[in-house]
Amino acid sequence: YNEVLSKQDVLNALAADTGGRFLKNTNALDAALITTLTEISRYYLLGWYIDPEKLKPGKYSTIKASIKGRSDLSVRVRQGSLDLPQLVAREKK
């Protein structure tokens, strides 16, 4: 039982860190699929550009997003990012 819980904790953390949700301990797959399909039909995809000069190779940068004045809406976004390509390129030198 503890092993199952620890695996669920990992999946829950992965979902939370990448802006998703983890549905556990339910056999109501039909309800989860309906909820998912409803949600994905109502979302916006945000993109942004990060100035490479401001990146610190190997450093974790947090990402925060909100909708000003719309507390009735929810935002799901990954926790942050790590600039691995710059880090790998620096270590190859």
Image: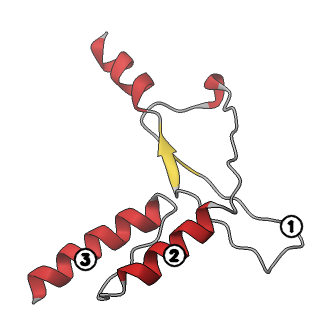
Q: Earlier in the sequence, mark 1 or mark 2?
A: 2
Question: For residue 7, what is the image quadrant?
Answer: bottom left
Q: Which residue is mark 3?
A: 8
- Residue at point 69% right, 73% down? 74
Question: Could you tell me which secondary element the residue under label 3 belongs to?
Answer: helix
Against 87, is 63 above or below? below
- Residue at point 46% right, 71% down? 21
Q: Nearer the viewer, residue 24 or 65?
A: 24
- Residue at point 70% right, 59% down? 65
- Quadrant of the frame with the N terminus: bottom left
Q: Earlier in the sequence, mark 3 or mark 1?
A: 3
Q: Please name which of the two marks, 3 or 2, marks the residue nearer to the observer.
A: 2
Q: Which residue is mark 2?
A: 34
The residues tagged by marks 1 and 2 sit, at their Cα atoms, a distance apart of: 28 Å
Q: Amino acid at mark 2?
A: Ile
Image disc number at residue 68: 1
Residue 61 x/y as whole percent = 55, 46
- Residue at point 32% right, 88% down? 26
Q: Residues within 10 Å of mark 1 (few under 14, many from 20)?
A: few
Q: Residues within 10 Å of mark 3 (few under 14, many from 20)?
A: some
Q: Residue furthest right?
A: 69
Q: Residues within 10 Å of mark 2 (few under 14, many from 20)?
A: few
Residue 35 x/y as whole percent = 54, 76
Q: Amino acid at mark 3?
A: Gln
